[in-house]
Image (cartoon, rainbow, N blue to C red):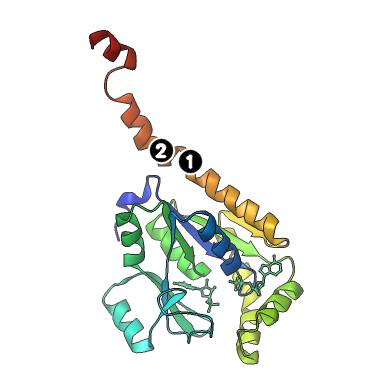
Amino acid sequence: MSTEASVDEFLLLILSSPSGAGKTTLCGKLRADLPRLRFSVSHTTRKPRPNELDGREYHFVDRARFEAMIEAGAFAEWAEVHGNLYGTAVSEITRAKAEHAQGVIFDIDYQGARQIKACFPDAVGVFILPPSLEELERRLRGRGTEDEPTTLRRLQAARREIAHYGFFDYVIVNDRLDEAYLRLRGVVAAESSRRHRWARLCESLLLGPEPATRIASG
Ligand code: ADP
Ligand code: 5GP
């Protein structure tokens, strides 16, 4: 897919973490705070949880539909995670650009993060860590959304996922939620201010006559 718009102010923000570390919670705060960042709604073959709405948390599809979308080249990235297929449709990114959003937030795993980074090298990867594996287990169980086999599978995957931390630009430990959120907000502020995102504006300000010249000739 085209990387044409990768060098401008549009921010591609990837949030990844082991299941239960608090990525959805942090993401929710960011979305409420910065409505001009569009949340990428992934497709998944996972069954919806009771509190989830089709089209809001995910587009819930069956495996046949998902595989047809892979065939059609509809995904910017996709991966098998915890036994289900998850993918980001290309249209999530193109629509955000068409709507002049400030950027897109992806809640995806490290495999998806790698694929997005391959297409958009200036995408920003943030890895959310729990303060400990014990606390991760407490949070995952406390959330109460998974049955026991799924909970165990997700906990067993945590170390394998943390092993990919080196792939991300930032690591945020989600111990106290408010502190972790401030750090995440800081990453967004700093990354949005990177020089290359504003090069076009700088260059456009350098074109045209000097203000003083305009006054003198006016
Ligand atoms: P993820 O999206 O990474 O799987 P969630 O955002 O669903 O994780 O968080 C898992 C559980 O932990 C939720 O019940 C959430 O309310 C809770 N949680 C998130 N952050 C914190 C935190 N800093 N301290 C305590 N509990 C938290
Ligand atoms: P959950 O089932 O808890 O919503 O998500 C499980 C895992 O799948 C999380 O690590 C989440 O980030 C990841 N995930 C969600 N959507 C996508 C996606 O579109 N692509 C990839 N690669 N991973 C995703």
What residue is pinned by disc 1? Answer: 194
Q: Is residue 91 left or right of residue 135?
A: left
- Up-down: is 135 above or below 35? below
Label for residue 162? none
Q: What residue type is labelled 1?
A: Arg
Mark 2 vs mark 1, CA separation in Å: 7 Å
Residue 71: which quarter of the image?
Answer: bottom left
Depth check, front residue: 218 or 59: 218
Is residue 164 toward the left or the right of residue 107 in the image? right
Residue at image x 57%, y 69%? Answer: 24
- The yes-or-no answer for disc 1 within 8 Å of ligand 2 is no
Which quarter shows the C terminus?
top left
* Residue 163 can be seen, yes or no: no
> What residue is shown at x 74% (from left), y 69% (from top)?
132
Residue occupying image coordinates x 42% and y 66%: 40
Is residue 207 found left or right of 22 in the rendered image?
left
